[in-house]
Amino acid sequence: MPHYQYIERPSPFGTKGGKTLPVFAVTPAHIETGAIDPLALDWARKAGFKAESGSLLLIPTDDGHLGGALFGLGTSPSDTPFLTGKLARALPAGDWHIETAPLTANRLLLGYGLGSYSYDRYKTKKPPEPRMLIPQDADAAEIRRQLAGVFLARDLINTPTNDMGPQHLEQAFRALAAHYKAEVSVITGDELLEKNFPLIHTVGRASAHAPRLLEMRWGKKGHRRITLVGKGVCFDTGGLDIKPSASMLLMKKDMGGAANVLGLALMIMDAKLKVDLRVLVPAVENSIAGNSFRPGDVYRSRKGLSVQIDNTDAEGRLILADALALADEEPPELLIDMATLTGAARVALGPDLPPFFTDDEALAHHLSDAAIEVDDPLWRMPLYKGYEKNITSQIADLTNAPSGGMAGAITAALFLKRFVTSTPSWVHFDIFGWAPVDRPHSPIGGEAQGIRALYRHIRSIAG
């Protein structure tokens, strides 16, 4: 079955048959000891190639044509597990294969595939790209599956809001569901009030594009029940507590939680894991109009808890609250929510290391192990009960924006926890969803974070 991608693109991988050029992935020790092809070694020594991390040297044939390439892994290849992503952007167009490499085939090809990503939907010229042959000892289906999930998340985040508003996110949601024959239901606009989703409606009502709650179901009853919830704020002005212009530049990525859970859902469904999967995405645009919600307003949530609005820019936790309450009414075995929620998480851990919060000790250990196994970094942060007092309000049950400005990621997680009371195992991810600098396995732009580790864990418990 072909893998669904939001934006169709050529595969970074070649097919068997036809001539391919060799890439020798080497460490400095290979050059020093001469443990590579003699012709490649001779050229490397003449050119002064030291096999430094990420370095590339093209090798000519005797008659002056391109004959192959040397790729440096540095002295510690394991320190940059997806370094081979650089090859996808450095090699000339053509068909290639890895001749030698002190890396596993899956890791090498996954790194190459991740690095091949580019977002060129609006480009008029698209240069030809190299293609790498997947060796026989690699799991081609698994590599393609994970790339499809990551690329879907990246594509959705990178798409500007004029083409990725709530209605467009619904279209992508439905397309993914249709590809894997999943069931979809959508509650839109004022129907949210009729069906008791007041906070989702409150946040999204000022937009020209109606707020909505997207729901997908896939799998079989009786299998392990897993629910994914993703924050789908397609653009965040900050509402009446308006963001400064510089802070709005990346706000197309505020639906990164939704993008990531859809990428994870793709992997789960494509692998046909034995799970009873449910995906919930509240999709809104936090805009400014005469009917915008205001600082000081108090609204009743689906859970029945009242929430005082102390900052309209703390809107993500509001829409998640209603979605989590719905998920908790039909308690799954595992409930996962992902959101680009707080700047405090970035201050604590930076853009590349997403924190997660859970009071399930076993789950925390399994996720940490999975993150290490697949090189998808995560870091557990505490649901510190001592900060519970910070999310209380004088006139309501909760405030959406505690005063003081400290421990913002923790208080946001504690806020969300109040809406999950029946589910035995819940975990909250506060992701950035963006790569601010080029890395071997990803260019600047939207990023999938944590979903390969989550997929690894879900696969282990689902069989």
Image: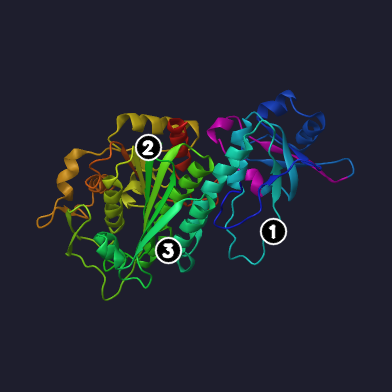
Does residue 67 show up magenta in the picture? yes
Residue 406 magenta: no
Q: Secondary structure at mark 1?
A: loop
The percent position of residue 371, horizontal first and vertical second, equals 45, 34
Tell me which label, 2 or 3, sits earlier in the chain: 3
33 relative to 431 in the view: left or right:
right
Q: Nearer the viewer, mark 2 or mark 3?
A: 2
Q: Which residue is mark 1?
A: 127
Q: Give the secondary structure at mark 2.
A: strand
Residue 427 x %, y %:
33, 40
| Residue interval drawn in magenta | 64-89
Residue pushed farthest left? 394
The residue that disc 2 covers is 379
Residue type at tag 2: Trp
- Density class for disc 3 (Cα within 10 Å; few <14, some 14-19, many ≥20) is few
Which tag is nearer the camera, tag 1 or tag 3?
1
| Depicted 73 relative to depicted 147: above or below | above
